Amino acid sequence: MIRKIIASTVALFLVLSFFPAATGFANSDVRVTVDRLPVSFPDQLPVISQGRTLVPVRGVFEQMGFVVEWDNSARQATLTSSTHTVVITIGSSVFTTNGVSHTLDVPAQLIGNRTMIPLRLPLESVGFYLDWDNLTRTAIVSTSLATRPALRPGVGAELGFGNSRIAEMQYGARHELEYTHIPQLVWSRPADIAGFVTSKDADGLLAVLGDAWDNIASQWIREDLLHIGSDRNVDLSDASSRSRAFSDYGLTQSFHIQNISFETINPTTTAALIELSDTGWFLISTFVAVVHDSSSGLRIFVLERDNAAVFLCRLHNVDGRDSISVVDNSRNAFVGEIREYYS
């Protein structure tokens, strides 16, 4: 649900490669920001050429800390930082970054004495990110994942994850784990889950939860790469690449699923307590309890943050979550409420 909300208002076809074709050059109304600060184009605005939006190299890359030099005889612009050297040749679709060749959709052009290029590939070649805000027609350049803004900052303000794309993705993945995947596991595999709980098999339960988390996190990363139109080579089928991507996006399983322990509620009832990281986000839990009772079977309880100061013990059933009581954010308080429920 959260993924649909976040994705529904943002076009998936982005990054300066989708505007209608024009005859010759036409000024575009595209704005550019770098790490949320606007880029000024005092003497040459972005233009549309061959259906692509071209942006002055100097303004964008200088704001990212590059030194931009022009070789008039070679008709080349060289962009240099402490770690990268990018060489762009006017009239050529090929540019190099640290000696590695890349191909642009549209050749670099000299317009108004400014070197003009489509931004996405040169930015990605130096490890930066490009998002597109279709509402404001803004190309959003971020020099790291950490500086990327949320797609829905208004939702972030309401739910506590703020204006951060990484936090937005983490929130979505956590919400999906808690509201969709754990209940699906419990209701679709009741015999297996009951076996893990009654035998107090933390490794077995963690294995199925880990598989679910890997699928959720991988899908969020795939959709993000699709959103930014990325050519980044992220092979999520490879364990090493997947681990690195999870770390980059803050989606490592060990951070979000921190521990599994067990509690005997009464002689016929056992609870598996899944401890989750306390993110401070609203409608996200710090504990999920999968409880097996020999008479009534499996139930799911959560300790959920309702707002900045209030936590609720809630019963998760097939129709949603029912509040039981306000409770302290602690394992002991949560277990106490579960005991009260079964008393």
Image (cartoon, rainbow, N blue to C red):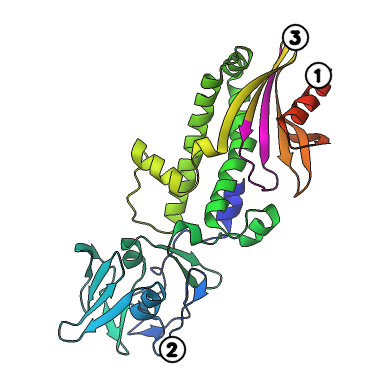
Residue 239 is labelled as none
Q: Amino acid at mark 2?
A: Pro
Whether 158 is drawn above or below 271: the answer is below
Please state if 32 lies on the left or on the right of 66 as rendered: right
Whether 254 is drawn above or below 79: the answer is above
Crowd class of label 3 (few under 14; some 14 to 19; many from 20; radius 10 Å)? few
Q: Is residue 281 magenta?
A: yes
As measured in the structure, the alpha-carbon distance from the residue carrying label 3 to the one carrying label 1 is 11 Å
Q: Which residue is mark 2?
A: 42
Residue 342 is labelled as 1
Callout 1: SS: helix
As measured in the structure, the alpha-carbon distance from the residue carrying label 2 to the one carrying label 1 is 70 Å
Q: Mark 3 or mark 2, which is nearer the start of the sequence?
A: 2
Q: Which residue is mark 3?
A: 267
Residue 46, x across and y down, in percent: 40, 81
User: In the image shown, does 88 or 280 lie closer to the viewer?
Assistant: 280
User: In the image shown, does 236 or 309 lie closer to the viewer?
Assistant: 309
Residue 167, x across and y down, in percent: 56, 52
Question: Marks 1 and 2: in contact by CB < 8 Å?
Answer: no
Q: Is residue 254 magenta?
A: no
Where is the N terminus found, in terms of image quarters? top right
As measured in the structure, the alpha-carbon distance from the residue carrying label 2 to the one carrying label 3 is 76 Å
The mark closer to the camera, 3 or 1, is 3
Where is the C terminus found, in terms of image quarters? top right
Q: Amino acid at mark 3?
A: Pro
Question: Marks 3 and 2: in contact by CB < 8 Å?
Answer: no
- Determine the residue positioned at 28% across, 72% down: 80
Q: Amino acid at mark 1?
A: Tyr
